[in-house]
Image (tube, rainbow, N blue to C red):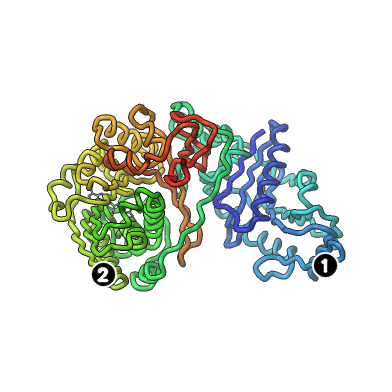
Amino acid sequence: MPLLVYRPRNYDQTHEREQFRNLCVLLKERFSSSPDEMCIFIGNYNIGDVELDGIIIKNEGVVLVEFKDFGGNITATENGDWTAETDGIKSVIRGGSGRKNPYLQAKINRNACRPVLVETGALTAKQVERLSSLIVFHHPASINNQISPRIKWLHVCDEKGFIDELDLIVTPECDLQEEDFARIIERLNLDPDWLCVRYSNPEVLINVNEESAEEEPAEEEHAPSDDTGMNIFDEIEAQAAVVKVEPVEVSSAPASTLPVWIESFLFDTLKARYEPDWRRFSDNLDLSDEDQRKYLGTYFPRSFVELNTIFGNLYKSGRFQSVYSNLDTIAILDICSGGGGDLMGTIAACLQNSKRLKTLLITVIEACESSINSLRYFIQECRKQYPYVTIECKCIRCRILSVNDILAQPINEYFPYDIILFDKAGSELFRQGMKTVYKDICSVLAPLLNLSGVLCLLDITMKDEGTGIFYPQILNDQVNRFISEDGSFSSILPLSCRFKERECNTPCYTQQVFSVSHRGRSNDVSKVAYRLLGHRVFVDDITRHLSPEGNTYVVSAVNSVTCKQCRGQNIVNAFELTQNK
Ligand SMILES: C[S@@+](CC[C@H](N)C(=O)[O-])C[C@H]1O[C@@H](n2cnc3c(N)ncnc32)[C@H](O)[C@@H]1O
């Protein structure tokens, strides 16, 4: 029965997406009638500096998988070209990125990832000694395999023959047991958010997580087991926070890019470096210049794209657009701004969409000196890029010990604010002891909003180690409490909250996935939870064309998690203001 399918990010090519889906269906059929076996399929996975179309780890062996968009009469050789002939037309089958043929490609991939599987501690040298490769053709194929029978590690088939060929791969030295799978999941950092639940048996993770409970969490761990040994799916269901619908196809967010000047300023001028280290950067009060470079190269682009996308999408909504695109001045307050990734992403959206914009009035509060310095550099550069816009920026260096400290700062000059940002800071303040930070922030900041202002509270999706509760749940719970006590404000997004927050007392695990490509990293994925709030009158106005009638809202597309307060036939993305009629 147990099959776990992971896919860190979607494939670029249509045929790859199709092949992945077809193989998942076949694997599901194969393993659902075999309760004693276990199989992990990881699609589109980078390991040892090579990109694998897939890797299959089953009890009797580990198999690297290559997809090929060919069929017909296939000739496979060690030295020459591989060819595919259909209706008398012959094509050469390339081995990917300029490599000579698929055999050589498979050999290079095998040699590159075998030592990594051992070095990570995922598998032993013996278990991967006879690591296999399987080349799978997308279309029906008749294979003339001229490769020496002595090369036993290479297998070739089409999709029809896939399961038979896979079953033939048996490595007696491998013989993986449940504890091996627990270790593999841990050591390969298989993030639960990569799970394709449509094809997987996530309940198996309860046991698997218990096996690896003592290990350090993986980078940006989002939904591991908690103290009860439950995984996020069980956890959320147990709380009746959500219902699962027939799983929604997981659509990876298309990777966004940074504006050229931002990318160049980050990496050329500020010498930023991509170097993720979630533990080091879970507390950013005191970053050295060296840390700051790593922070900027890794986390700035993510924050930029998150906020740029969120506000860019708001501008696409008719009523919001009609108000905001006519503004000539926009006042922004950014609490715990860091180096300004969220601020710059927001500003870029405003500059792009508010065509009459002449003045930006910015106030930031931040404790870390090197972060304030970076933000100032960005503002200076922004002035050069947009000389026709006046950009005033007031940076207040202050360590917030209680949320009321914000009101003690000189923040009135540009009051009231069109946009207030409180991004990825609640989790830090929560760990510093401010246990009702999201609710208190709403109480203090929402009244500073202009009548058509937007307050964005956004945070990471990890679990708080002290309470064992995920930050999205803490955020949603506290925002709901604020809203139910103060009738003058409402959520704009997620839409399920917009309609049901007053009667909802469920701490929901919400999540949206973003992806950014820049010169430090392509397709860097970030996952965040957020709520956008505004004055109730304004929110009613910009959402008046929407109704929850007949809708089921997906609040975390990765896990096909939906809000249980609204059930209907239409499956709707809770984060899209524009798609919902
Ligand atoms: C993860 S960063 C987020 C930066 C930015 N908002 C973004 O989304 O990219 C959190 C920021 O909060 C600041 N911070 C944490 N605790 C603080 C406190 N008590 N007072 C003021 N700033 C604080 C940190 O210095 C850090 O720059």
Separation of marks 2 and 1 at Cα, in angstroms: 59 Å
Residue depicted at 13% across the width and 53% down the height:
410
Indicate if the residue with disc 2 has its beta carbon within 8 Å of ligand 1: no
Q: Which quadrant is home to the N terminus?
A: top right
Q: Which mark is residue 380?
A: 2
Residue 231 in the image, given as x and y percentages of width and height = 49, 34
Q: Is residue 222 visible?
A: yes
Residue sitting nearer the eye, 169 or 430: 430
Q: Quadrant of residue 390?
A: bottom left
Residue depicted at 68% across the width and 55% down the height:
15
Q: Amino acid at mark 1?
A: Lys
Residue 493 in the image, given as x and y percentages of width and height = 38, 42
Indicate if the residue with disc 1 has its beta carbon within 8 Å of ligand 1: no
Q: Quadrant of residue 14?
A: bottom right
The residue singled out by tag 1 in the image is 90
Which comes sooner in the sequence, label 2 or label 1? 1
Q: Amino acid at mark 2?
A: Gln
Residue sitting nearer the eye, 12 or 426: 12
CA neighbours of label 2 inside 10 A, class few (<14), some (14 to 19), many (20+): few
